[in-house]
Amino acid sequence: MKYKNLGRTGVIVSRLGLGTMNFGPHTPEPEAHQIMDRALEAGINFFDTADIYGWQTGEGITEQIIGRWLAQSPGRRDQIVLATKVYGPMGTALNTSRLSALHIRRACEASLKRLQTDHIDLLQMHHIDRSTPWEEIWQAMELLVAQGKVLYIGSSNFAGWHISRAQENAARRQFLGLVSEQSVYNLLERTVELEVLPACRAYGIGLLPYSPLQGGLLAGAVRRAVSEGRGAETKNQERLKHCRDQLAAYEKWCADFGEEPAAVGLAWLLRQPGVTAPIVGPRTLAQLEGTLRATDVALGKAELAALDALFPGPGGAAPEAYAW
C-alpha cells in the first residue's frame, strides 16, 4: 500500500480508502468484519462511514458494526484514520438533520457512542446546508475540535463555490476549515474537474472520490453481462445500455494492457492531481481483493491519453474548458 498526506494536513492516509456503505444492508456483519480485517492487513488505514449508513432512520447500523469491530481489539482504533459524516436525517423530529449547531453536536455524540470511540478523526458534512450560516457551522465544529471529540473537518457533495465560501469563513475565524472533500469522480463522471477539483487544489483540500467505479460499470460490467448474464446494479442498468460500446472498448483496452478494469479505473484516479484516496466500497471480500492491485498499476502518459480518448472529460478546469 502507498500513502499520502490528507490534503494540507500532517496526517497520512492510505491511497485507497475503505468505504463501508454496504455494511449491514448488503454485507452481513461477520463478512464486514472480515473485510475490515483484510483491509487493515493490506495497509488500508482510512475507514470511511456515515451516521445514516444502514438506511434505517436513526439506527446508525453501519457505525454500530464498525464500533463492534473496533471493540474486539482496542489496538485497532490507533491503527486507522476514522471518518464519518453528519447531515442526513437521524430521526423524524425537528432538528434531527442538516447542519445546525444543535444537530451537529447531537449527531457527533451519537456517532461516538455507536463507533465506541472517544474521538472522530474526520467529521464530514455530508451535504451543503443552504439554510444554516457558516458562522454557526464553524462555531459548532470549533467546539468539537476544542473538546477533542473531532480532529479534522471535511465536506462531501460540495460545489466549488461552497468550498471557497466555507474556507474564507474559516480563515476569518483563524480555523483550519476543510481538509477534504468527497465527490463522485471516475472515468465516466468527470464534472468535478471543472471547479471542485481546482478549488480543492487551491485550498489544499484532499479529494476523496466516491463511487470510483460508478457502481461497478467500470469493473467489467459488460464482461459480466455476457459471461454471467448480469451487469451493473439496477440503478445503473440504463447507463450500461447507453454506454455499452464505450465500456466494451474500455474492457478490451484493459485486457490488452493486462490489467483488470477495476484496477485500471482506480489507478487512473490515483494519477489525477489533487486526489488523495478513492473510496472503495466492497460488498464482498473478493471485491476488496480486486481493488488492492490498483496502487501498483503503472499508467504512463500514453495510457492516460488513451483513457482520456475513451472517456473524454470536460476539457479541463473552468472557464477554459468551455470559454475562449
Image (cartoon, helix red, strand yellow):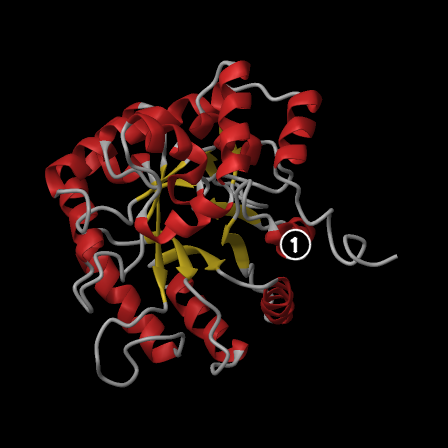
> Would residue 139 appear left or right of 165 to someone viewing this image?
left
**Whether residue 304 is situated above or below residue 278 in the rendered picture:** above
The residue nearer to you, when weighing 76 against 59, is 59
Q: Identify the residue at horizontal 21%, vertical 80% (top origin).
A: 92
Q: Identify the residue at horizontal 19%, vertical 41% (top origin).
A: 70
- Name which quarter of the figure residue 300 lies in: top right
Quadrant showing the N terminus? top left
Residue sitting farthest toward the bottom: 94
Q: Identify the residue at horizontal 83%, vertical 59% (top origin).
A: 323
- Name which quarter of the figure residue 187 lies in: top right
Quadrant showing the C terminus? bottom right
Q: How many marks?
A: 1
Q: Identify the residue at horizontal 25%, vertical 54% (top origin).
A: 118
> Would residue 174 appear left or right of 105 to someone viewing this image?
right
**Can you see residue 39?**
no
Q: Position of residue 226 (x, y in %)?
A: 35, 29
Residue sitting farthest toward the right: 324
Secondary element at image label 1: helix
What residue is pinned by disc 1? 203
The residue nearer to you, when weighing 314 against 22, is 314
**Can you see residue 180?**
yes
Q: Position of residue 239 (x, y in %)?
A: 45, 49
